[in-house]
Image (cartoon, rainbow, N blue to C red):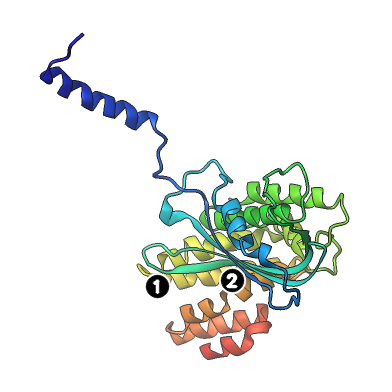
Amino acid sequence: MKMNISSLFKFVPFCLLCIMFWYPSDTTAQEIDANVTVDRSQISSTSLGYLDNFPQQIEEYINQFEWTNANFNENERIKMSLQINLLSVEDYNFEAQIIVRSQRPIYNTTRNTVIFLFNDEEWNFEYTPNRTFLHDELQFDPLTSLLDFYVYTVLGYDSDTFEELGGTEYYQRAQNIVSLAQTTSAIGWSRSSNQRNRAQLLSNLLQTNFEPFRRALYQYHRQGTDQFLNNPKQARNQILSALGKIQQAQRQTSSDLLFDTFFNAKYREITSIFKDAEPQIRLEAYNLLSNIDQGHLSEYQKLQ
């Protein structure tokens, strides 16, 4: 059957429309935008060329997997950095430390705010040449399971800043990894009360005693920093209230791991928020901060 020119011009746009609906859209992105650096300066071995692709493999493992059912626009992706410090190696078995950092945008600005900063000092894993990374949350692997754990923890922190207790689902997924790890002899996963590690961190996040802390994350970010440009006075009041919730949580527990993690990420930001406030508000902030975060007292003295 022949098709005349007029019919052809009617047919072609229809075909293009069909293709647009059939072809997968790439307007949404994965949840995480991870950047990985690896420091191997403390290892004396000269035969470590197979590590050259190690950072890229981790980035691809994190960035290309769909961790949630949510749709993230490119500018909404969570920026996550992982600084891996290799300490020793023997037969492809590495001892390492990892510093995990995440941040999210501050609404109505071009700035980001750090929401999670954690220094994990105990990590042992095996990495062999040409190793593949497989995502399997039913099987514990010292390398990929730790990456999974921190992705879900970062997702939990991020969600807590947008909705009160919004990160619970992701913390529970991270807890599943902790439980699986504790069936092995892998280090860094013990829930011993005197260890400041990933297992204790996650345990605290899911305890009801720490709910005021998690609610403070929402109030600090969504009702505080996100509103600062429009109404600085009201935003500071919200942040002061959030710090009061953190003080409330501190009084209910003897563990300071979550609080130290928060203030290590935030102490300079908090100072900058209050440094231009009215004298009475500055003093109120100083008195509160000097009580709940004495580790950064020298920074807060700028508010006096």
Q: Secondary structure at mark 2?
A: helix
Residue 165's x, y, as percent? Answer: 61, 52
| Residue on which the image places disc 2 | 243
Residue 139 versus residue 284 in the image, above or below: above
- Describe residue 156's horizontal placement relative to residue 303 as left or right: right
Q: Answer with left or right where residue 193 lies relative to residue 173.
A: right
Using residue 96 as the reference point, say whether residue 11 is left or right of it: left
Q: Nearer the viewer, residue 50 or 79?
A: 50
* Three-letter residue code for mark 2: Leu
- Outermost residue on the top side: it is 1
Residue at image location 53% in from the left, 66% down from the top: 220
Residue 54 image position (x, y, % from top left): 64, 61
| Residue 110 appears in view | yes
Type of the residue with mark 1: Pro
- Which callout, 1 or 2, points at the residue further toward the start of the chain? 1
Residue named by callout 1: 232
